[in-house]
Image: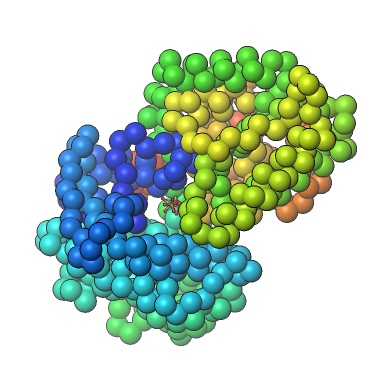
Amino acid sequence: MTRLVIISNRVAVAKARGAAGAQGGLAGALNSALKEHGGIWFGWSGQESEDEAGSMNLQRSDGVTTATIDLPGRDIDEYYNGYANSTLWPLFHYRLDLTEYERETGKGYERVNERFAEAVVPLIEADDLVWVHDYHLIPLGGALRARGVSNRIGFFLHIPWPPTRLFVSLPFHERLVRTMLEYDLIGFQTSEWRDSFLHYCSKELNAEVDEDSGTVRFEGRSVIARTYPIGIDWDHFQTQGRTGESRNAHQRLLSSSRERTAMIGVDRLDYSKGLPERIDGIGRFFDQHPDRVRDLVFIQIAPPSREDVKSYQDIRLLLEQKTGQINGARSEVDLVPIRYVNRGYSHAELFGFYRGSKIGLVTPLRDGMNLVAKEYVAAQDPDDPGVLILSRFAGAAEQLNVNGQGAVMVNPYSPDDISDAISLALDMPLAERKARYEAMIATIRDDNVQSWTERFCTDLKA
Ligand code: F6P
């Protein structure tokens, strides 16, 4: 089988936490891809190096070889905190209000992409498939080509691709997309993001675009852009659900919520996840149904992330404030309506928490896919499933909103919409819960992370 060289900003092996754990869904997904194909996973160690050079650390664990480099403090500031997470992340999540346009961080971003290319080239063998991941490393394909790498190189974007009108607010937008056209295959989570990319290529670059096949022809090169919705590791997750750790977590949740219905949200603490808006929706539900405060307990698990970036510090404060206000106004000596937890949990524990929660609340303002939505459904008891409330702006909505069945869809900006959906879910009869579950479960089970990897790698090889 062809070896795989995976390149991503973060490298994580074994013990990856759940989809909202510190490393997000990407880590677990790539780990299982590598186990199957063999090869190397290269990226940043997450550590700061003492000097400019930074040495490579090779490790073999659980059948996967990882190669990591440390980065100097300036690179971490300009590349990770700066351009990746203060420019591209907000812009690609349609948050122009939070997007910073700094030439210096743009240079740092390009410098680190060059640094990555320099370090990884000696690890690439002639027949390897090279698979680059996410917005941190968009120009890496170009940097590899410039060093003579002629292997098949694919790129997968885990986050949305913004509409052209927003994207052109990025200085040097054309330069960034030109480097993308050095890849052989570009994958997007949904057809919406893929279409936006094709629209940009045709409108701004005057590239020749064939929408059906996703082929973009530009200056003698040809690249294919396709949709590959990422899935969960179904088998692994079900195995985790059968562990004592998972049963304990389930039991802890049930006994602490007693006769109240548990509703759960699990997200990295990120403004794209719509957490303050979600709390407003819950507040609206309590305002409209004060008699039901005793029926519901909301559990929000939100491990902090990107804590050196100011917009992340701000969102954390806002969330604490809103949660505190509702709990202050609605708590009784024996009842707290919102439990807000700032830490991550293992997959086994999350399975148990999801299983014990009759409502899953997944309401991002914009999200590439959102694997929490899929994990929540995957953890349900088929004979007595809970209800998934899902934002229409999550990539997962393309798969889980099945002809009005499947998830209960909401506009995450509307507190009334969230409040109505909670009412509906609380009172939903078993037959409807089962029908909605049935509408979603096949795609969640079958379109899993293994088939996602296979589809992408097969197309890349071709
Ligand atoms: O899914 C998007 C993503 O940026 C992944 O690339 C990343 O692993 C995850 O979110 C967590 O973010 P970070 O690596 O910045 O903690």
- Rendered location of residue 326, percent (x, y): 77, 38
Q: Residue at x 82, y 35 (%)?
A: 329
| Apparent side of residue 42 relative to residue 396 in the rendered image (left or right) | left
| Apparent side of residue 391 relative to residue 84 in the rendered image (left or right) | right
- Picture quarter containing residue 250? top right
- Rendered location of residue 7, percent (x, y): 28, 56
Q: Residue at x 48, y 62 (%)?
A: 85
For the residue pair 251 and 337, the one nearer the viewer reads as 337
- Rendered location of residue 105, percent (x, y): 42, 73
- Rendered location of residue 172, percent (x, y): 45, 82
For the residue pair 379 and 185, the one nearer the viewer reads as 379
| Apparent side of residue 362 relative to residue 448 in the rendered image (left or right) | right
Visible in this render: residue 252? Answer: yes
Residue 423 against residue 452 in the figure, above or below: above
| Apparent side of residue 20 relative to residue 76 in the rendered image (left or right) | right
For the residue pair 119 and 407, the one nearer the viewer reads as 119
Visible in this render: residue 419? Answer: no
Count of residue discs? 0
Q: Residue at x 21, y 41 (%)?
A: 64
Asked which colour scheme the image uses, the reply is rainbow
For the residue pair 252 and 152, the one nearer the viewer reads as 252
Q: Residue at x 31, y 68 (%)?
A: 112
Q: Quadrant of the C terminus?
A: bottom left
Residue 28 against residue 255 in the figure, above or below: below
